[in-house]
Amino acid sequence: MSVVHWDDVERRHRAVGELDATWRILGEAAGTVTVGVNLAEVPRGKLPTPPHSHQSSEEVYFVLRGSGLAWQDGNVHEVRTGDCIIQRANERSHTFVAGPDGLDYLVFGTRHRHEMAWLPRSGALLTAGAWVHGRLDDPWELEAQAPPLDVGEPAPRPANILNVDEVELEETGPDVTTAPLATRERSDQAGFHWERIGAGATGSVPHCHSEEEEVFVIPDGEGILELWPSPRAAERGVIREDVPLRAGHLVARPPGTGVAHAFRAGPKGLTMLIYGTRRPNDLCYYPRSNKIGFRGLGVIGRLESLDYWDGEERDQ
């Protein structure tokens, strides 16, 4: 499975004390490998999680609907629809407090085998998939026994919180507009962009990655996901597959599939949220031009042959 609609993903509700949220584990449903993607719906005045930080994982949040406060190391900052909030690994303890109309957001995060998460209020530490505290309490239950989270007056927004409206838009193709949000100066492990493709236009050219994983969420519009077969599959007569998309779809493109992807907007245009990991040893293949990009070297070249053994046969 690489395409899933969030209406088709099971809702998981958990409410303990001031913690209350309904979760949909979208990445798992779509088959992501190196990243996770969740959709959270938080009712008025509630927190989705305790304040927490990650040792290894970097999280990128995008507010789909509503408003509220981003709580970061004791300070609070107003957030609204269209905001992107970037939490680097091992940097800040953070959570949200939903506003009067609730708060719905997506959260993207890198996965790490040896991750640790820290909950400062309860002293709970998540390591190797287990909560460590020298006792058997569920940390959510322990958090519920604490006084309500102290929320003061909102402070000016720091650099890790920004809205699509606050970013200078870039023309990245014919009738394609991109708002760069999680850029290299704001995030370390992954990039995140908002993109609008005009009616009938196409986004980036067909390509696939060897190490990087990309995830696309469609908050608005409709269009087509083009899946281009690998060169070997094309030689066997496999043709391009077109998958219809609409608002609410998530597309997962794990690394190493050998299947290239591209997006084409429908008659009303297509809006995408684009999340992609950064791997210095990644290779990117472009099937239409038969080119390969070498991420770590910053160069691109063209393949002479699709036959692995052509060179050896010529040398004999």
Image (cartoon, helix red, strand yellow):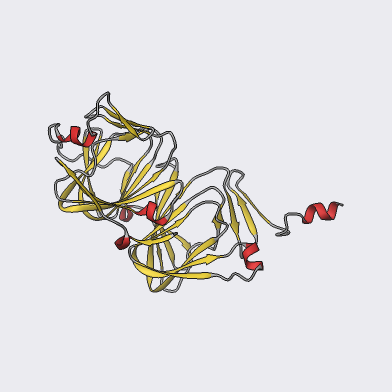
Horizontal side of 137 relative to 125 (left or right) equals left
Q: Is residue 93 above or below residue 42?
A: above
Question: Could you tell me which quadrant the N terminus lies in?
Answer: bottom left
Horizontal side of 132 relative to 231 (left or right) equals left
Could you tell me which residue is drawn at 26 percent across and 55 percent down? 11
- Residue 237, located in which quarter of the rendered image? bottom right
- Looking at the picture, how far across and down is residue 259, in whole percent? 55, 60
- Residue 179, located in which quarter of the rendered image? bottom left
Q: Is residue 240 above or below residue 301?
A: below
As drawn, the residue found furthest toward the front would be: 136
- Residue 250, located in which quarter of the rendered image? bottom left
Horizontal side of 1 relative to 236 (left or right) equals left
Residue 254 shows in the view: yes
Between 237 and 49, which is closer to the camera in this rendering?
237
Could you tell me which residue is drawn at 26 percent across and 42 percent down? 157
Could you tell me which residue is drawn at 55 percent across and 42 percent down? 280
Residue 168 shows in the view: no
How many numbered badges does the structure rendering display?
0
- Looking at the picture, how far across and down is residue 123, in whole percent? 25, 27
- Looking at the picture, how far across and down is residue 47, in whole percent? 19, 43
